Image (spheres, helix red, strand yellow):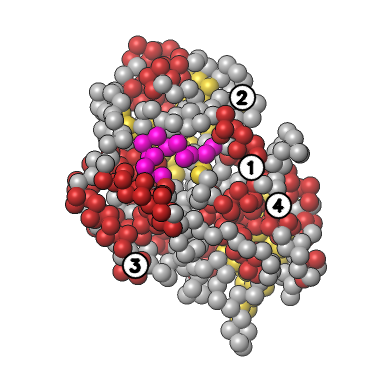
Amino acid sequence: MTDDAQISRAYLVGGGIASLAAAVFLVRDAGMPGENIRILEELPTAGGALDGDGAPESGYVTRGGRMLEDEAYVCLWNLLETIPTLGDDAVSVLQETKEFNARWLTHANARLIDADGHILDASRLGFTTADRVEMARLLALPESVIGARRIEDFFSPHFFTTNFWAMWRTTFAFQNWHGAIELKRYFLRFLQELPRIHTLVGVRRTRLNQYDSIVRPVQAWLERQGVRMERGVRVTDVEFDVGEGGERRAERICFVQDGTAGAYELGSRDYAFITIGSMTADAGYGGDDTVPELVRDKRDGAWNLWETLAREASDFGRPGAFNGNVDEAKWESFTLTMRSPALLKRIEEFSGNAPGTGALMTFKDSRWLMSVVVPHQPHFDGQPGDVYTLWGYALFVDEPGELTGKRMSEATGQEILTELLGHFGFDDIADEVCATTAVTTVMMPYITSQFERRDVRDRPLVIPRGSVNFAFLGQFTEIPEDVVFTVEYSVRGAMHAVYGLLDVDKEIPAVYHALSDPMTALRSLKAVFA
């Protein structure tokens, strides 16, 4: 506990998991009274990308699906081990998650499916000697040499036809044009997954979707500590002062709420934690008979705020490197809400996986490169026993589908369902499934923007040089060696921000290095040469 924390105030811009985690660390580890903490969120619901919403009548929806992992998610587990579940204060979210995964073990039997609806032998990764040499070269090069080059700059065409790439890219949502630095970090961070990428037995999941299983319990804990969540607050600027010695201080947070401009003045002992950018900003929604809008004009405040801040200091990052090409960063997801068990029963017969025991099933030859996963039921709090859900997404949303002939970006929810059923070869149950299923689609213009090509100037440090009272949070900060597009990244950044600014005398869990474990390295090497 720090002495200043008792009389300090903290303002957290954004209500995503990074801010929620930072608030927990401020109370739990820095000793700041909860009533001294305000979270400023533009949207009606907190949680950011960790969302889960809907009802059995209108349909459920999650924009994305997250797969957690034992070795790499140490900061997330640190957070959740002290957060009680909503149903039992004596059981932590971490304990619930461990117990759930012990009961529902993941072992995908149908990771890849071909054009004829047959399950491929995904254990055959398909590497040639040239592929292995190219992988080794990327791993050996320092990031300063890799620079802002693309993944496809480092590999020959054959690599992109392998079973390995079909599984790796859909597990983590990589495009060939994404930054090679990010792929290298993923190779190093998740090398332990390489021998089991065809079954994903290392995947860990929460009991329900992450909003219900993580966000709501964290929110409830924070509310009990007195932390205030202010919704409908669009932060437009943060004003800074630079001292003679180069120290920098956040002095004022400017915002608009209900059409009225306002500001929070920061005292000499106050702190600002600012989430920059958003991978789920400007998400557009569609339904059974509608197509989601692709928003290109930055209506959400997250990107506008970062662009404003970046004009104030050269080391506050360059958001244009990430939000400057929507067509490279977008993809579309969909959630099925089914009032008949027909599709889930058929998928279980087809794959041999009961709901919650499989993983992503990828249609390798699909021009959309579509993947789906059947979660354990129920997946939403309050979901009735006779209602079922399934989630899926596709990386190539502007390619014509084999069954509908339409681009996914121009297809209605029911047309996407028709495409899915055709790839499975389930034509005999198509009428029943379509008649009893509601489809919610989501187009996300920036969902993989954090993977865009970048250099060292494009992402700001969590605590910029000279900062005495402010830090940046989220997926667009720079945390050496760690990988973006993970909950772990947001939580680790929050821990760095709070511990660093408030001098918390606690050790931040180290980034897991699979290569430091000889057995893990050996298993991975065997998989590459199999």
Return the disc, 2 or 4, that comes first in the chain's sequence.
Answer: 4
**What is the secondary structure assignment of the residue under circle 3?**
loop
Tell me if 232 is positioned left or right of 116 in this view.
right
Query: Image point 38% across, 40% down: which residue?
Result: 197
Q: CA gap, disc 3 to disc 2?
A: 48 Å
The residue where tag 3 is placed is 142
Return the disc, 3 or 1, that comes first in the chain's sequence.
Answer: 1
Q: Tell me which amino acid carries mark 4.
A: Glu
Which callout, 1 or 2, points to the residue nearer the camera? Answer: 1
Disc 1 and disc 4 in contact, CB within 8 angstroms: no
**What is the secondary structure assignment of the residue under circle 1?**
helix
**What is the secondary structure assignment of the residue under circle 2?**
loop
How busy is the neighbourhood of tag 2: few (under 14 within 10 Å), some, or many (20 plus)? some
Q: Tell me which amino acid carries mark 3.
A: Pro
Q: How many marks?
A: 4
Query: Image point 26% across, 33% down: which residue?
Result: 365
Q: Tell me which amino acid carries mark 1.
A: Leu
Tell me if 397 is positioned left or right of 53 in this view.
left
Query: Image point 69% across, 67% down: which residue?
Result: 505
Q: Which residues are magenta?
A: 193-205
Query: Image point 31% across, 65% down: which residue?
Result: 141
The residue where tag 1 is placed is 94
Which callout, 3 or 4, points to the residue nearer the camera? Answer: 3
Return the disc, 1 or 4, that comes first in the chain's sequence.
Answer: 1
- Horizontal and vertical percent position of residue 68: 51, 43
- Horizontal and vertical percent position of residue 105: 51, 31
The residue where tag 2 is placed is 383
Return the disc, 3 or 2, that comes first in the chain's sequence.
Answer: 3
